[in-house]
Image (cartoon, rainbow, N blue to C red):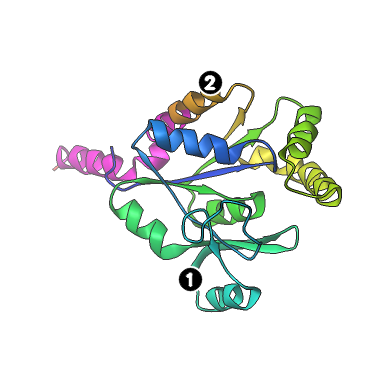
């Protein structure tokens, strides 16, 4: 297998359990490292700067954009979100798969820049389950919940741009499916270019 790591982009509607999935995936497998995003949204209870997010002011975030320090960035429900480049590049060079948990606009920007990125979209079993999960979190006002549901309607139109969808119904099953999908994707010709180039060169040598 190629020695360099790959970008694994995980998206999904707010309330689908992406964060829980990522936590379990990293606990069970040593193959992955989770990229820490920068954001201008306020920290939720228990969230730590530099661990869950790099929490920035709007001015600080816009300075990062201007300096070219972000792999991608986008606005979502009134806040900036983005992926710092330095961390991702360092981990890929070590041969680690770097997971980016980002929204759909940022994911498609990543795919345009890095065609070999593996894009996964997490969905709920149904629209009704999504509403129940959002309301059950108890962390947001009804107005914000309605905004997130409206945003989910918009995002649902872009899911076909992803490589795989994963239905988060049973957490244990979902985590294992995600791991197996990523491992299998490593063997696509697009992601084994180094090996294929070596193979082609060896075959060309037979023609000499």
Quarter of the image for the C terminus: give it: top left
Q: Residue at x 66, y 54 (%)?
A: 105
Where in the figure is residue 58, as x and y percent of width and height? Answer: 65, 73
Judge left or right: residue 9 versus residue 153: left
Dividing the picture into quadrants, the one containing residue 3 is: top left
Residue 106, horizontal then vertical, whole percent: 61, 55
Residue occupied by mark 1 = 69
Instruction: Choose the circle earlier in sequence order: 2 or 1.
Output: 1
Residue 61 lies, with reference to residue 44, above or below; the image says below
Q: Residues within 10 Å of mark 2 (few under 14, many from 20)?
A: few
Asked whether residue 174 is drawn in magenta, I would say no
Question: From the viewer's perspective, is 47 left or right of 28?
Answer: right
Which mark identifies residue 173? Answer: 2
Q: Tell me which segment is drawn in magenta.
A: 181-207
Q: Secondary structure at mark 1?
A: loop
Q: Secondary structure beneath disc 2?
A: helix
């Amino acid at each position: 297998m190629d020695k360099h790591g790959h970008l694994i982009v995980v998206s999904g509607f707010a309330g689908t359990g992406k964060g829980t999935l990522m936590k379990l995936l990293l606990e069970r497998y040593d193959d992955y490292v989770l990229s820490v995003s920068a954001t201008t949204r306020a920290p939720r209870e228990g969230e730590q700067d530099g661990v869950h997010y790099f929490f920035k002011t709007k001015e600080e975030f816009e300075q990062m954009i201007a300096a070219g320090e972000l792999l991608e960035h986008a606005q979502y429900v009134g806040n900036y979100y983005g992926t710092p480049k330095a961390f991702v590049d360092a981990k890929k060079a070590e041969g680690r798969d770097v997971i980016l948990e980002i929204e759909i606009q940022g994911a498609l920007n990543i795919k345009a820049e890095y065609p070999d990125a593996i894009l996964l979209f997490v969905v709920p079993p149904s629209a009704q389950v999504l509403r129940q999960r959002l309301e059950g979190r108890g962390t947001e006002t009804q107005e914000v919940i309605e905004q997130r549901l409206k945003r989910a309607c918009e995002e649902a139109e872009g899911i076909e741009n992803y490589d795989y969808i994963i239905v988060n119904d049973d957490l244990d099953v979902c985590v294992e499916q995600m791991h197996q999908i990523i491992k299998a994707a490593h063997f696509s010709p697009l992601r084994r270019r180094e090996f294929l180039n070596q193979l082609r060169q060896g075959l060309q040598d037979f023609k000499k």
